[in-house]
Amino acid sequence: METLELVETHVSRPKFRSHYDNYIGGKWVPPVGGEYFDNQSPVDGSLIAKMPRSKAADVDLAVDAAQKAFETWGKTSATERSKILLQIADVIEKNLEFLARVETVENGKALRETMAADLPLCVDHFRYFAGVIRAEEGSATELNADTLSLIIKEPVGVVGQIIPWNFPLLMATWKLAPALAAGCCVVIKPAEQTPTSIAVLFELLEGIVPAGVVNIVHGFGPEAGKPLAQHKRVNKVAFTGETTTGRLIMQYASENLVPVTMELGGKSPNIFMKSVADADDEFFDKCVEGAVMFALNQGEICTCPSRLLVHEDIYDKFMERVIARTKAIKLGHPLDPDTMMGAQASNDQYEKILSYIDIGKQEGAEVLTGGGPAHSVEGGYYIQPTIFKGHNKMRIFQEEIFGPVLSVTTFKTAEEAVSIANDTLYGLGAGFWSRDAHELYTIPRQIQAGRVWVNCYHDYPAHAPFGGYKKSGFGRENHLMMLNHYRQVKNLLISYSKNKLGFF
Amino acid sequence: MNRVDLTPAAADILSQLKAEHGPLMFHQSGGCCDGSSPMCFAKGDFIVGESDVLLGQIDGCDFWMSEDQFEYWKHTHLTIDVTPGRGASFSLEIPLGVRFLIRSRLFEMAEYEQLPPVQTGPLAAQ
C-alpha cells in the first residue's frame, strides 16, 4: 500500500513566549487582575500565547505612565523624535522576515503579503513621519507694524489608539508614527484577535522608545477598550473599526469634549469602462488583476474593492478573465511562500462571511465562482474566493462582508456607473479604470470617496492622504496632515507697541 | 411575526449577560473589521438618535439599526445566533469567547405584508 507523504513547504513558525504582558512605562507589567486569555492562530487554531486580560485599572496605569512621559517627550526636539522614528524603522527592517512570520501566524494572511506589503510599509511610514517633521515650519505673520502673530503647533498630550486586527502592525504604525512625530504619548489597545505582533515588535524596540511614550494595554473591547475611549485624562482618541463602535467612541469623546479620528470601512466600487478592453495587452492584464484585488488580505481590508462595476459591452470578455484569474488564486498554508490567499482572521469572521454568502444566494445572486469554505489547513478558517453576479440593492452589494467576496454588476453609461458607485452608505475607497484621458479625471471627481485609485488599486504609499467620506469616517492618515489631528494650534499674539489702548 | 429572533444558544448567552450587566440592548453595526455584526450593550450605554430604527424586542432587549442601513435590510428576517470566536468591538459577550452574529433569510411576501411598521428615534422604545 502506498503512503502519501506530506511535503512541508512552508517556512518555520516563529517561537513565541508562553505569555506576554502589558507594556507600561517601559516595563512589561502583568495585568492587575492577574488574568490572561488565549490568543489562537487562525492558521490552524493552535495557541500562540496567553495575553493579558486588562481592565480599567490597567488602563489607568498606562495613562499615568503616558502623562508622566509627556512632561519630557512633549518638549523633545523634532530632531530627537525624528531620530527615534528612524531607529524604529531600522529595527523593523532588520527583523522584517521574522515580523512577517509573526504577523502571518497571528492574522492568517499569506506570508507573501506580510513580506511584500505590511512590513515594508511599516518601515516606510515611520521614515516618512521622521522626515516631514524635520522640514515643517510654524508661521509668523505681522498683523500690523507692531503686532506679530506666531503659530506654534503643540502636541495634544496623551492619545488613546484602538487598533484593528486586519493589519496588526501596519494599522498600529499608521496611528503611532504621526502621534509620536507630533510629540504625543500613546496608550494603544491592540485588537484582541491579534495582540501578539505588537508585543513582539515592542520587545525588539526596547531601549529605543523612551519609557512611557508608548504603552500597550491588551484585553477585550468592553473591558479595556471602553475604559480607554472613555478615559478623562486621554486628550484624543483614534479608532479604526465599524460604525456602531465609532459612534460609541464619539459619544464618549463628547462627554470629555476631546477630538477623535475615525476610519470606519466601506463598500468600495471598482469601475471598469468599456475602453479597458480595447486591446488585449499589458494594461488589460493589469485591469484583470485590479478586479481580482478583492482577494488581497482575504478581503479583510476596509477598502476591499468588493463591488465590481463593468461596462455591459465588455462584461463577457472581461469576466471570463477575472473568473479564470480568481480560480488561479492558490490557497494553502499561509507560511508557504507560494500561497496567495491565507486564512480569515477568526472563527466569528469566518462564520459571518459564510452567512453573507448564504444571504447572497437567497437574494438570487448568481455564484460565478467559489461560494463556500475551503480547507487549506486543518483547524483554520479558510474561504474560497467568491464572485457573485447581482444588483446594487442586494445586501451583498451594500454591506461590508470583510471577506474574499466580490459582487459584480453591469452599467450602460458613465452616469449610471457613478450613480451605482455612489449608492452606498460609505465613501472610503474606489477604483476607476479607463484608457480615455478625459474620463480619467472627470469621473473620479464625481465619486464620493476619500481615495479614488485611477488605473490602479490597493496602493498605500506614505504621503498620499487616506480617509473616508460619508459613513466611512473622518481624518486623513498616511500624510503630514495627520500631524494636525494630534496637535493643538498655539497662537502667540505679541504686541511690540509701548502705548496703551486707552480704554481704561 | 417578528423582524428579529434569537436562537436558543444566543438566548442562553443573553441571559448570562443580563445576570451580569442588567438590562441590555442591541445595535446592528455596519462597516469594517467587526462591522455587519450585532453589538450588545448595557441598556442606555449606546445613545440612539433620530437616525435609528427600532426593529423590535428580543428577550426584552431593544434591537436597533441605523435608518439608512435598515433601507437595505428591511426585506430580510434576522436571527441572532452565537458562534465561538474572538470578535473585537465593545460588545459585551466578547470576554465569554463567543460572538453574536446575524443569520438572515428573505421574508415571504405574505409575512412582509403582516409586519408592523417600525418606529424611529429614541422615544420609540418608551
Image: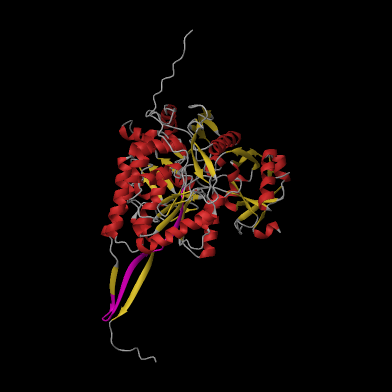
Q: Is residue A148 magenta?
A: yes
Can residue A294 be seen at all in this image of the molecule?
no
Can you tell which quarter of the image residue B79 is in? Answer: top right
Q: Is residue A441 magenta?
A: no
Q: Position of residue A492 (x, y in %)?
A: 33, 74
Q: Residue furthest top?
A: A1
Determine the residue positioned at 29% across, 49% down: A87
Can residue B77 be seen at all in this image of the molecule?
yes
Q: Position of residue B68 (x, y in %)?
A: 57, 51
- Horizontally, is A146 left or right of B47 in the view? left
Q: Main secondary structure of the magenta part?
A: strand
Position above or below: A189 against A69: above
Q: How many marks?
A: 0
Q: Quadrant of the C terminus of chain A?
A: bottom left
Give the magenta-colored segment's residue range.
Answer: A142-163
Q: How is the image coloured?
A: secondary structure
- Horizontally, is A12 left or right of A245 in the view? left
- Horizontally, is B24 left or right of A173 in the view? right
Q: Position of residue A311 (x, y in %)?
A: 43, 38
* Closer to the camera in the image, A341 or B56: A341
Can you tell which quarter of the image residue A79 is in? Answer: bottom left
Q: Position of residue A372 (x, y in %)?
A: 54, 30
Position above or below: A194 against A1: below
